[in-house]
Amino acid sequence: MNNQLIVYANNFNYEYVIYFAPFTAPELCTVNITDLGTNDIQCDFVYSVITPNNQSALPCFVYNCIDILYRNVIGRIDFVNNGTVCAYEHMNSVVSGNYSTQDNFVIIIDTNGTGVYAFADDFITYYDFGTWKMNVWPNTLPISPRAVDLTTNYGVLTGYCQTTPLQAFECAIVIHVNGNLSSPSYTTSFSIGGSLNFSWADPRSTHFIATARAYSTVTSWQLLFQHFLIVC
């Protein structure tokens, strides 16, 4: 949400639900998740929707999804001021390259509102709102992403870092971003497990998982066996 709209994706009903300001008596709009957009791309499952901060232009939101052909997609929906509450323009693009469906796929709009970054296990993209061109790079960062936040040139990407073939831990890395000129790089990484608390029944309460890409817990005997192999 921002100062102009609240939006969420309802994957069960295949619709985006939008509430426009003023929120004391909001106007409601729905847009079909399966709307084809400019490039005839039909989403099947939406990962997330985000909005620019303190938006002053016409309301809009950005989403990332998997389409019916199992491709990774990023799109933007702009609401136009033509007297009709739900009139909109819809731009979208498929992430190029032979990338499989990504389980971990997060997006964030840059601080200038001129484009959106996407971080996935296998790739990183920058989708430029001025040219509607998408730059795609292989993800060489040492992290499986779960969340991201940005300032003008720097940001923090959090997720899981793989330390051994059988063990990964909660971590964050400081990244440097440069729009469509180059893939984001990182300067440092650090553990964040001590700042996270989970209930005893949550499998993440051990603060370790087997693989960074999936929530597969590591048991105490697995850790002991792994330690034995390293010592020996």
Image: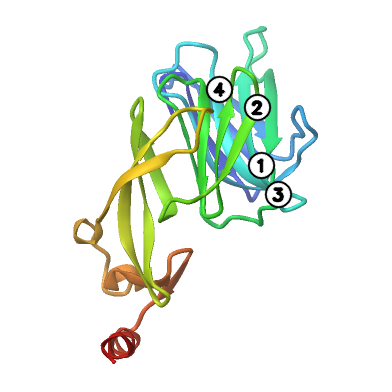
Q: Which residue is mark 1?
A: 95
Query: Extreme right residue here?
Result: 40
Viewer-nearest of labels 2 and 3?
2
The residue pinned by badge 4 equals 60
Q: Position of residue 87 (x, y in %)?
A: 68, 17
**Picture residue at 41% right of the left edge, 33% below the top:** 177
Q: Earlier in the sequence, mark 2 or mark 3?
A: 3
Q: Residue 28 in the image: state x and y as whole percent.
A: 57, 25
| Residue 71: mark | 3
Q: Which of the image's four quarters has the C terminus?
A: bottom left
Indicate which label's residue lies in the foreground, 1 or 4. 1
Could you tell whether 218 is left or right of 31 in the image? left
Give amino acid for label 1.
Val
Q: Residue at the spot x=33%, y=33% of the render?
A: 154
Disc 2 and disc 4 in contact, CB within 8 angstroms: no
Residue indicated by mark 2: 133
Q: Which mark's residue is nearer the viewer, 2 or 4? A: 2
Residue type at numbered disc 3: Arg
Q: Badge 2 local density, few (<14 within 10 Å), some, or many (20+)?
A: few
Q: Earlier in the sequence, mark 2 or mark 4?
A: 4
Q: Give the distance between the C-alpha atoms of the residues marked 2 and 4, in whole angstroms.
A: 18 Å
Q: Who is closer to the viewer here, 212 or 25?
A: 212
Q: Nearer the viewer, residue 78 or 173?
A: 173
Figure quadrant of residue 155: top left
Residue type at numbered disc 2: Lys
**Crowd rating for badge 3 (residues with CA inside 10 Å; few <14, some 14–19, many 20+):** many
Question: Which circle's residue, 1 or 4, is located before the other in the chain?
Answer: 4
User: As drawn, is 160 to the left or to the right of 114?
Assistant: left
Q: Are marks 3 and 1 in contact (CB under 8 Å)?
A: yes
